[in-house]
């Protein structure tokens, strides 16, 4: 125990005097998560919180145009713009604004669109009435317009998913208008048949017999945390920064080998494992402190910069266990690199580049779910993805210790394997 | 009893074209200051590394105070041997006091007793005023002296020093050699390697000259010098046995 405590104290003294190391371990990660959360805020908001300006040219001036304008406005995702420079917006102007990239979407409701829908609804009602032996009374247009359509214009740089979401929303409004008008016509026809009934007692036709309701599942059903820029970036880049501890650890180990202090430690009776354990414990402690400092930034600093506040989930013991497990894996990786490589330059370059690769494939930069299938399979082999999965389970799904055990087992298992390889390599050096 | 007994030691490092040791044998009686001398590449550092268990020999036997240097007995040997490596095996960012307290802790010493012991040694080596100075800022001589203190914290019966006076000034060298005499006077054994043959001649009671991984000659400096007609000092003896060709 004395050897272990002495080693922890020694590592603390060494780190305290290493200003560059302290900056790398604490200051740079704090800047990194702040910058990453800020610059990735807009892409995260794209489909969740940002309101898009939508140019609307209403050549119809009927119910369809009104429905579309009201529907888009009520969705909370769009600002409907139907005038430009205090003039009603024309289709030509809207097209030029889109082409310039000033706006992303424009819709043009064609003249006579509502009349066409009404005529179509009347035709259906007349047809039904005729089949039921009732007199057909509703007016129908003599000539049916060819391919009358609500015209959409998108900025060519718009993403496919964005275009698809807009098209789906507009399609819903069109269906809604056509259904409403049809029901209204049916109701009118029924009323005219039963003119004796009082208007206010006439039963309304209810279209939505079955609706949609969202309910949470699993351990996290009581909380509702949206995966926003802060919720993804703070834990993700914190894990990335924690893994960067391999650089001071590998440097520290190679320096000890080069300056002979490793030889001195090995010449002293007693198990070298206790010295290594002290080193491991110290750096795991540093990782945990790093992690919670970065979480504090997510909770207190980022909201001051206009970003959402980081939610830590309900099980803080699970969070601590995950942070410590990530720390064990990162420290073990540092020890392995420090053992395998002979010079600090080799170790530092390999360490830094390998962490960037492991983080890229492990879903730190962009969520794993949006990567191609093969990359997802490869990414799930990265220890950084196990750490991020566990953190997401706790913070987003309100998981507990039981929920994250598979990821914790992977992290600790991986750390144990790396330490075993380092021990074998070190043992072979004596031979 | 011998402090060190080496018998038919062989060692070839992985990937090396030539063996470092080819049947090296020597022994030194306990309680003496012995010198292991040889030109560059003779195999001195390999021999010391095997003596302290840092490198495993391919063949041959090593006994320290009759304890065989083999798996299961190495801890016992570490307790009686103190090694002063050629490198300054200290943490340059830590002060002398912090370094020595850490190594003392690793030996199992702690508290005031350890601090007093460390301060005593620092004083003996003229380093008490530099106790709280980072070792990285020390002069070469101060580093060498601190390096020696780290090896004697557990008061070993055998002190092995690899080039302990390399790159130090005259005063530091004098202090180190005086310390070795005093340490030996307490009944401890000392094994010492050096390129400085005049120094070896001054303090060693027994020297083994080795070259190309083998023992060339062993004896007291006086006997070795007197045994050869044309030799006036240990350097002449050394050149007689190892030749004048430059070694890399």
Image: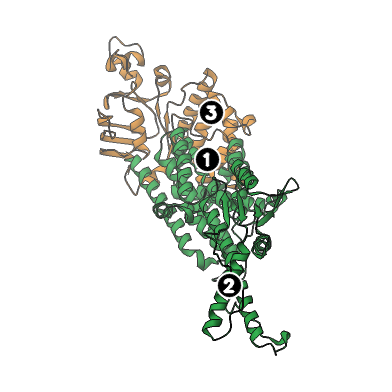
Chain colours: A green, B orange
Can you identify the residue that label 1 sits on? Answer: A248
Q: Quadrant of the C terminus of chain B?
A: top left
In the depicted view, which residue is nearer to us: B9 or B67? B9
Q: Quadrant of the N terminus of chain B?
A: top left
Picture coordinates of residue A229 (x, y %)?
A: 61, 52
Q: CA distance from mark 3 to mark 2?
A: 99 Å
First in residue order: circle 2 vs circle 1: 2
Q: Which chain is disc 3 placed on?
A: B
Same subunit, tags 3 and 2 = no
In the depicted view, which residue is nearer to us: A108 or B197? A108
- Camera-side mark, 2 or 1: 2
Position of B24 compared to B181: left or right?
left
Q: Residue at x 48, y 21 (%)?
A: B167
Disc assigned to residue B143: 3
* Label 3: few (<14), some (14–19) or many (≥20) C-alpha neighbours in 10 Å: many
Residue lying at the far bottom in this picture: please name it: A196
Q: Tell me: residue A295, above or below residue A125.
A: above
- Camera-side mark, 3 or 1: 1
Picture coordinates of residue B115 (x, y %)?
A: 60, 41
Dot 1: element: helix
Q: Which chain is disc 2 placed on?
A: A
Q: Residue at x 51, y 28 (%)?
A: B144
Q: Are marks 3 and 2 in contact (CB under 8 Å)?
A: no
Q: Residue at x 53, y 57 (%)?
A: A164
Q: Which chain is disc 1 placed on?
A: A
Can you identify the residue that label 2 sits on? Answer: A121
* Label 1: few (<14), some (14–19) or many (≥20) C-alpha neighbours in 10 Å: many
Disc assigned to residue A32: none
């Amino acid at each position: 125990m004395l050897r272990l405590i002495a080693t922890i104290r020694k590592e603390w003294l060494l780190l305290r005097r290493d200003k560059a190391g302290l900056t790398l371990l604490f200051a740079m990660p704090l800047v990194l998560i702040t910058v990453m959360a800020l610059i990735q805020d807009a892409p995260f908001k794209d489909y969740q919180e940002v309101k898009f300006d939508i140019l609307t040219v209403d050549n119809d001036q009927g119910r369809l145009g009104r429905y579309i304008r009201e529907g888009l406005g009520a969705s909370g995702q769009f600002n409907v713009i139907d005038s430009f420079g205090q003039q009603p917006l024309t289709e030509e102007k809207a097209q030029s604004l889109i082409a310039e990239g000033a706006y992303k979407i424009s819709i043009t409701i064609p003249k006579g669109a509502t009349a066409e829908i009404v005529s179509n609804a009347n035709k259906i009602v007349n047809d039904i009435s005729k089949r039921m032996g009732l007199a057909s009374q509703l007016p129908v247009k003599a000539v049916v317009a060819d391919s009358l359509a609500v015209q959409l214009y998108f900025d060519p740089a718009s993403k496919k998913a964005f275009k698809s979401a807009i098209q789906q929303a507009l399609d819903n409004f069109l269906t809604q208008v056509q259904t409403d008008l049809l029901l209204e016509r049916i109701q009118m026809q029924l009323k005219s048949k039963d003119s004796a009934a009082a208007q206010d007692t006439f039963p309304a036709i209810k279209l939505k017999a079955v609706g949609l309701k969202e309910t949470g599942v699993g351990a996290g059903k009581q909380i509702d945390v949206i995966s926003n820029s802060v919720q993804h970036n703070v834990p993700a880049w914190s894990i990335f920064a924690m893994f960067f501890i391999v650089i001071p650890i590998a440097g520290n180990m190679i320096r000890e080998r080069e300056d002979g202090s490793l030889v001195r430690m090995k010449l002293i009776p007693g198990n070298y494992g206790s010295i290594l354990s002290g080193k491991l414990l110290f750096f795991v402690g540093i990782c945990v402190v790093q992690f919670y400092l970065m979480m504090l930034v997510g909770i207190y600093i980022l909201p001051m910069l206009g970003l959402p506040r980081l939610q830590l989930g309900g099980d803080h013991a699970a969070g601590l266990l995950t942070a410590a497990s990530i720390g064990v894996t990162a420290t073990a990786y540092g020890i392995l690199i420090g053992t395998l490589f002979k010079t600090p330059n080799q170790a530092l370059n390999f360490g830094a580049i390998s962490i960037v690769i492991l983080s890229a494939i492990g879903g730190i930069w962009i969520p794993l779910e949006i990567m191609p299938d093969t990359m997802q399979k490869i990414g799930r082999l990265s220890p950084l993805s196990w750490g991020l999965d566990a953190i997401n389970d706790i913070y987003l799904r309100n998981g507990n210790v039981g929920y994250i055990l598979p990821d914790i087992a992977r992290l600790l298992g991986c750390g144990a394997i790396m330490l075993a390889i380092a021990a074998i390599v070190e043992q072979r050096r004596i031979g | 009893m011998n402090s060190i007994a080496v018998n038919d030691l062989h060692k070839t490092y992985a990937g090396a074209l030539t063996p470092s040791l080819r049947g090296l044998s020597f022994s030194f009686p306990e309680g003496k200051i012995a010198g292991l001398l040889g030109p560059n590449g003779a195999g001195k550092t390999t021999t010391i590394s095997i003596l302290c268990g840092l490198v495993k020999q391919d063949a041959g036997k090593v006994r320290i105070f009759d304890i065989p240097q083999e798996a299961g007995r190495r801890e016992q040997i570490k307790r009686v041997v103190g090694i002063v490596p050629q490198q300054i095996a200290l943490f340059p960012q830590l002060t002398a006091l912090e370094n020595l307290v850490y190594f003392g802790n690793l030996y199992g010493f702690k508290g005031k007793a350890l601090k007093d012991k460390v301060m005593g040694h620092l004083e003996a080596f003229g380093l008490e005023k530099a106790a709280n100075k980072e070792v990285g800022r020390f002069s070469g001589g101060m580093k060498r002296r601190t390096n020696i203190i780290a090896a004697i914290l557990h008061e070993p019966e055998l002190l092995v020093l690899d080039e302990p006076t390399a790159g130090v000034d005259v005063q530091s060298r004098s202090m180190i050699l005086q310390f070795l005499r005093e340490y030996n006077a307490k009944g401890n054994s000392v094994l010492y390697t050096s390129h400085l043959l005049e120094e070896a001649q001054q303090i060693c009671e027994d020297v083994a000259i080795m070259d190309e991984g083998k023992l060339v000659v062993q004896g007291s400096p006086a006997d070795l010098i007197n045994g050869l007609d044309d030799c006036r000092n240990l350097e002449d003896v050394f050149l007689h046995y190892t030749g004048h060709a430059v070694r890399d």
